[in-house]
Image (cartoon, rainbow, N blue to C red):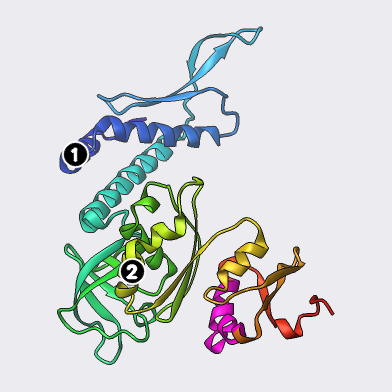
Amino acid sequence: MDIQMNELRIVESELGISVDVIVGAIEDALLHAYQRVPGAVRGARVEMDRNTGKVTVYAPEVDEDGEVIGEFDDTPGDFGRIATATARSIIAQRLRDAEADRVLGSFKGKQGEVVSGTVQHNARGDGRDILVDVGEHEAILRAEEQVPTERFRHGDSIRALVLDVSISPRGASVRLSRTHPDFVRRLFELEVPEIVDGTVEIVALAREAGHRSKVAVWSAQADVNAKGACIGHNGQRVRAVTMELGGEKIDIVDYDDEPAKFIAAALSPAQVLRVDILDRDQRLARAVVPDGQTSLAIGKEAQNVRLAAKLTNWSIDIRKESEDPGADG
């Protein structure tokens, strides 16, 4: 059973992929195929002659004590067809990988990163989808991935999160987003070195794009002020993120393993007098606030309490101090 070595050498020449690498992949795939054959011997190996392309399955020969004393040829009779199909499949996959590298270029592996580009024009004349020149490729920012309050014109500079990168019949397909919560996370990474080096961690993030984000931060180092690191001197770090997001409000709060403390912090900027944990299994809590802070705690159209609930993953009931059933008297 032979595999055409000239095909492998063509791949090596055109793609720069070593024949040894391709042969190794073929041998591994054929060994898996052999192991599925009825009566396959455990511990067998597949060897492909680098000169002739001949494929042989060598199985261990054992004595009556179970000791390996040699090897014998256990190549199945119909293995030629399987070997040929496997080799062609491996070559085809290597060709696809090479094409992906060529088409995607530097964008391969950029999913989840922030990129800069220039707005070109609407992708569709009657829609809000826009095309963005990001260097090697043209990316698309769909209407649903744009902040509703933002408007872009041809030639505007723009930054966005790479949602995904894939191969399409027309080449590389790069999708962007400015509404994804990870866009806020990555912007903070660009502004706060302590996040990049692991000193400060963004534990949780909740966002309603264009309106408000809440970011919970924490540091394992007792002498590090995680919240202060993200705010920056005179607020310059958080202000840079806010400006990139078109004025979106950002609340940076301290994360705490104790749910009551975390919930109280998450309701910032409102003052919280007390948080009662009503049901840990159902994650239900009640926050008691001064009467004058109720509207602030709930927020316009319940936005503040809704984001706090998303951030903490707790259902939060806001209660006025005057209506607090747990108050004395």
Q: Is residue 323 left or right of residue 250?
A: right
Front tag of 2 and 1: 2
Q: Is residue 72 visible?
A: yes
Q: Is residue 305 left or right of residue 278?
A: left
- Write down the residue under mark 1: 16
Number of numbered discs: 2
Q: Say which element carries label 1.
A: loop
Vertical order, 130 against 177 (above or below): below
Quadrant of the rendered image containing residue 290: bottom right
User: For residue 304: magenta?
Assistant: yes
Q: Main secondary structure of the magenta part?
A: helix
Q: Residue at x 47, y 32 (%)?
A: 31
User: Label 1 amino acid?
Assistant: Gly
Q: Does 87 sit above or below residue 20? A: below
Which of the image's four quarters has the C terminus? bottom right
Tell me the distance, in whole angstroms, between the alpha carbons under discs 2 and 1.
44 Å
Identify which residue, 114 or 248, lies in the foreground.
248
Residue at the spot 17% in from the left edge and 62% down from the top edge = 136
Neighbor class of circle 2 (other Cα within 10 Å; few <14, some 14-19, many 20+) is many
Numbered badge on residue 241: 2
Eyeballing the image, is 36 above or below 184? above
Residue 72 part of the magenta segment: no
Mark 2 touches mark 1? (CB < 8 Å): no
Q: Which residues are magenta?
A: 293-309
- Classify residue 324 by image quadrant: bottom right
Q: Position of residue 67 (x, y in %)?
A: 60, 8
Taking the view exactly as shown, the residue that stands out farthest to the front is: 329
Q: Where residue 309 appears, x then y in whole percent?
A: 60, 73
| Residue type indicated by callout 2 | Val
Q: Secondary structure at mark 2?
A: helix
Residue 165 visible, this orientation: no
